Amino acid sequence: MQDGVYIEYLMEQRIMRRTNIMDELHKIYAGKYERWIRQYLISKQILEAPLFIFCNTLYKLPDTFRICNNSFFIGDYQLYKYLYDWNYEEHQDILVELCLKQYIESCYLNDKLDEAYWLCLTCDGLENYKSGDYFEDKAIYYYGERTGIQEEFTLVHEASHYEYRFIDKEKETKDIREIYRLVPRVRKMSEKLAREKNNDSDKRLFEECYCDAESIKFILDNYIPNENIKIQDIFFLLFRTLLYIYILMYIHSMTLEKDETPRKYYDYQLWELTYRMANMYTVIYEWLLANMPEQVNVLKKIYSDYIETFKNKMKKVREVIEKLKDIMQQNDDNMRKLSKRSENEKKQLIKEYLKLC
């Protein structure tokens, strides 16, 4: 009973979206759970896997948690859709629409009701980009396969958090803790931010790096060559997953700040991301040396290209969000007038706009 009450509360906090294929999605994600999460945990001699909860929410990110003696794992279909759209953005320039969509969703998640309401009234046809070849079988298959790799990375990463509680943390993260000495860019940023870090932040970062590494090794160890996704495609997709998750978290955090977020916060977030990317590169590099040494130079080129992609993409995302916040500030009087409308009226419009339950 206690489990059910808490899970119901958790789903309310994540905010459910509507879908007319829920039963079909349940079956699909039950299969993903067996192929990815259970198989990963079995490979680590963990036979008692957490109970699986499938959902379709604005929160998007997977999660593991414990209630009394029961552990649970959450998989969210909206993460797949989010990653799919950002992959599609590489083909069709819809960055502004994706940033705006995520900003509205994050406003609602963070109880910024007036901001979400005004944006819903102002931004008509937010998902108009879902036209043309977006629903063509060829596009769905192409972007679907690539998004599947990225979703596998995020779900196995989360399963690694569950496994992490059972390991010798000092021993398993020893090499991870030394990455800042090996990669010049990370070392430079580490020295700059050393005084601003704390042990708790470091422990959390090292855990994230461990989970990244475990997920990557699981994907590469189980990779089956095919003509649609070559091994070098996987490198780029894995790096991009981290970028897209960072964009999600960046936009989410920006809705929490009325004024400009302190630069120091984003410097640290960028340092964390750079550290994780360096860790991912090291893991893939070592795997290639042992299994496909002929691909090492390919990895170096892809990583170099990705760094440029990351810089350009984040610059555009920040420009969009900063411009949006400027526009909202300029329309502060209009938002104040709209804020006088009833909460039910606002929620009803937002729920319809975002297709919420």
Image: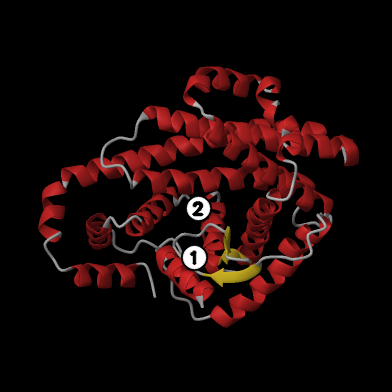
Residue lying farthest to the front in this orientation: 68
Q: Position of residue 222 (x, y in %)?
A: 82, 55
Q: How many marks?
A: 2
Residue type at the position of mark 2: Gln
Above/below status of 80 relative to 27: above
Residue 16 in sight: no
In the depicted view, which residue is nearer to us: 251 or 45? 45
Q: Position of residue 48 (x, y in %)?
A: 75, 66
In the depicted view, which residue is nearer to us: 307 or 344? 344
Q: Position of residue 296 (x, y in %)?
A: 81, 33
Q: Residue at x 65, y 78 (%)?
A: 27
Q: How much space separates mark 2 and mark 1, taking CA atoms?
A: 10 Å
Residue 186 in sight: yes
Quarter holding residue 344: bottom left
Q: Residue at x 40, y 50 (%)?
A: 99
121 horizontally vs 252: left or right: left
Residue at the spot of label 1: 132
In the depicted view, which residue is nearer to us: 29 or 2? 2
Residue at the spot of label 2: 92
Residue type at the position of mark 1: Gly
In the depicted view, which residue is nearer to us: 74 or 133? 74
Asked if the residue under mark 1 is in contact with the one under mark 2, i.e. CB atoms within 8 Å, the reply is yes
What SS does tag 1 mark? helix
314 horizontally vs 335: left or right: right
Q: How is the image coloured?
A: secondary structure
| Label 1 packing within 10 angstroms: few (<14), some (14-19), many (20+) | few
Of pointers 2 and 1, the one earlier in the residue sequence: 2
Above/below status of 273 relative to 142: above
Q: Residue at x 71, y 40 (%)?
A: 169
| Label 2 packing within 10 angstroms: few (<14), some (14-19), many (20+) | few
**Which numbered disc covers residue 13?**
none
Above/below status of 49 relative to 323: below
